[in-house]
Image (cartoon, rainbow, N blue to C red):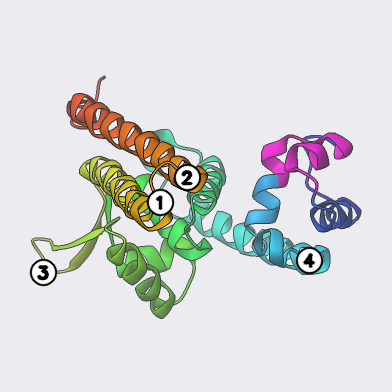
């Protein structure tokens, strides 16, 4: 039923579709569901290579129970700032985490990243992440280590000397620049093969065309990032 929770039978159909190599859009069409629902279902439950209908169904039941407990605690606690709906915020964080997963992040670092970006301060302590995500301190530590290694978060000390994990807009700029550098490295490597394979040969021409393409893309990324950098630092509007 469109809009409701996935049933176990629907999950079995998703598993069959994934095993058959169907696109998420086609699986969604057969189920009369949004493509985003199928994508999120697969990515949060093992990905294309590890999705299992029975495991996904049990995992969803566990998440539902945890969400119910969290909702009860939220009701007993003070309301979220700015009149936010706790359930809507949680659902959005999960959707945002799915986007990070599709970009290549494992599930837990993706959840940490989403939690940081949706916090008003753009920073959280380890204890706050443990409470928000309902995971162990070791799980948070491992996720942060990966995000730090990728340059997606940084650490700083607050006035109480607590270690905070921070994301800021500059991360997006640096990410684009890193992407451009990777493209440049690829084009340089492609050109090294031209001399090896022989200038003018079909393989060498192919590599030269790839190198020219990657050079153009890298230059375009750097130019666009520099031009748009100030957008990242614009103050919030009322």
Above or below — where is 32 with respect to 153? above
Q: CA distance from mark 1 to mark 4?
A: 49 Å
Quarter of the figure with the N terminus? top right
Residue bounds of the magenta highlight: 22-38
Give the side of residue 218 with respect to residue 133, left or right: left
Determine which residue is flagged by label 1.
198
Disc 2: which residue: 201
The residues bearing labels 1 and 3 have C-alpha atoms spaced at a distance of 61 Å
Q: Which mark is residue 52?
A: 4
**Dot 4, crowdedness within 10 Å: few (<14), some or many (≥20)?**
many
Q: Nearer the viewer, residue 221 or 133?
A: 221
Q: What separation in Å lies between label 2 and label 1 (alpha carbons)?
A: 6 Å
Q: Are marks 2 and 1 in contact (CB under 8 Å)?
A: yes
Q: Name the front one of labels 2 and 3.
A: 2
Residue 163, percent across and down?
Answer: 19, 68
Q: Is residue 217 magenta?
A: no
């Amino acid at each position: 039923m469109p809009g409701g929770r996935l049933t176990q039978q629907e999950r079995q159909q998703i598993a069959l579709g994934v095993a058959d190599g169907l696109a998420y859009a086609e699986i969604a069409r057969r189920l009369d569901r949004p493509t985003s629902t199928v994508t999120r279902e697969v990515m949060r439950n093992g990905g294309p290579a590890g999705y299992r209908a029975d495991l996904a169904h049990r995992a969803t039941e566990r998440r539902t129970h945890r969400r119910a407990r969290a909702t009860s605690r939220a009701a007993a606690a003070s309301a979220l700032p700015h009149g936010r709906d706790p359930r809507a915020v949680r659902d959005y964080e999960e959707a945002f985490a799915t986007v990070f997963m599709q970009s290549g992040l494992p599930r837990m670092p993706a959840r940490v990243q989403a939690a940081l970006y949706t916090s008003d301060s753009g920073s959280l302590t380890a204890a706050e992440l443990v409470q928000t995500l309902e995971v162990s301190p070791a799980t948070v530590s491992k996720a942060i280590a990966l995000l730090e290694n990728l340059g997606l978060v940084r650490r700083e000390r607050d006035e109480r000397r607590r270690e905070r994990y921070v994301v800021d807009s500059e991360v997006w700029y640096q990410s684009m620049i890193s992407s451009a550098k990777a493209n440049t490295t690829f084009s340089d490597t492609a050109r090294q093969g031209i001399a090896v394979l022989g200038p003018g040969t079909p393989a060498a021409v192919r590599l030269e065309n790839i190198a020219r393409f990657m050079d153009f893309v890298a230059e375009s990324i750097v130019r666009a990032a520099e031009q748009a950098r100030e957008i990242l630092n614009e103050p919030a509007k009322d």
